[in-house]
């Protein structure tokens, strides 16, 4: 079995000085590693019987779409403001780099629908908190949040738990 952590590459000073970017593309490029990541995510997600996967722009789309296909669920996009063409619901989405907004189409999640949320990486947890808030405002029931990587030294999982203790959080790799 592939060691997913060993494939992730540190890129210093990207996107700005002082940041060590975790480049996940080697995991995505390696067929065995990517399939392992999706299989492991699916194993966890199945415990919650999701009806939909919602993923955060942009690298979250890669893992979220593959997971939705594996689970045979619908797939919804959580995008930055101004990227979706129809009527949307918007929430504030501050992150470690800037203050942004997340949006989703009003019809992207049905009332009461069980939703697993996916992103590529959990850093400070602010994106996850905003995405969970958006799903709830759309009437969905967030049942889990998952990512390939957690930067545990930034306490993002703690921040998510403080905001939404009822939503379990999973990451396949921890730094």
Image (cartoon, rainbow, N blue to C red):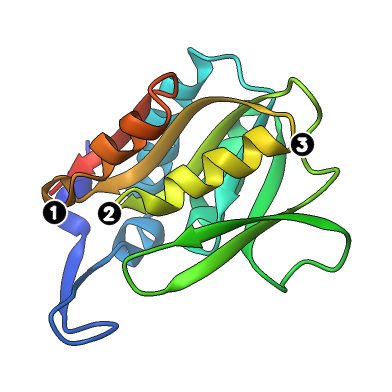
- Residue 102 position within the rendered picture, expressed as x and y whole percent measured from the top left: 60, 59
- Residue 51 position within the rendered picture, expressed as x and y whole percent measured from the top left: 69, 23
Q: Earlier in the sequence, mark 2 or mark 1?
A: 1
Compared with 137, 24 (above or below) is below
**Would you call the spot at circle 1 few (<14 residues within 10 Å), some (14-19), or many (20 or more)?**
few
- Left or right of 136? Residue 67 is left
- Residue 18 position within the rendered picture, expressed as x and y whole percent measured from the top left: 12, 80
Answer with the quarter of the image where residue 27 lies.
bottom left
- Residue that badge 2 annotates: 123
Answer with the quarter of the image where residue 21 lies.
bottom left
Q: Is residue 118 visible?
A: yes
Q: Earlier in the sequence, mark 2 or mark 3?
A: 3
Q: In the rendered view of the protein, which quadrant contains the N terminus? A: top left
Label 3 secondary element: loop
Mark 3–mark 1 contact, CB under 8 Å? no
- Residue 54 position within the rendered picture, expressed as x and y whole percent measured from the top left: 62, 42
**Would you call the spot at circle 3 few (<14 residues within 10 Å), some (14-19), or many (20 or more)?**
many
Foreground of the two, 24 or 97: 97
Q: Earlier in the sequence, mark 3 or mark 1?
A: 1
Q: How far apart in space, not on screen, are marks 2 and 3 (Cα)? A: 25 Å
Mark 3 or mark 1, which is nearer to you? 3
**Would you call the spot at circle 2 few (<14 residues within 10 Å), some (14-19), or many (20 or more)?**
some
* Residue occupying image coordinates x 64% and y 33%: 136
- Left or right of 142? Residue 127 is left
- Residue that badge 1 annotates: 6
- Residue that badge 3 annotates: 109
């Amino acid at each position: 079995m592939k060691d997913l952590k060993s494939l992730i590459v540190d890129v210093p000073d990207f996107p700005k000085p002082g940041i060590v970017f975790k480049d996940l593309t080697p995991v995505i490029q390696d067929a065995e590693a990517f399939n392992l990541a999706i299989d492991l995510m699916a194993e966890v997600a199945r415990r919650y019987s999701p009806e939909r996967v919602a993923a955060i722009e942009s690298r979250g789309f890669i893992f979220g779409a593959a997971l939705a296909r594996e689970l045979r669920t619908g797939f919804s996009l959580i995008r930055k403001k101004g990227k979706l063409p129809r009527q949307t619901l918007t929430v504030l989405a501050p992150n470690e780099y800037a203050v942004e907004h997340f949006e989703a189409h009003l019809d992207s999640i049905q009332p009461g629908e069980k939703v697993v949320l996916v992103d590529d990486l959990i850093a400070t947890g602010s994106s996850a908190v905003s995405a969970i808030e958006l799903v709830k405002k759309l009437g969905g029931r967030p049942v889990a949040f998952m990512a390939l990587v957690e930067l545990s030294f930034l306490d993002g999982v703690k921040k998510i738990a403080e905001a939404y203790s009822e939503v379990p959080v999973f990451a396949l790799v921890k730094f």
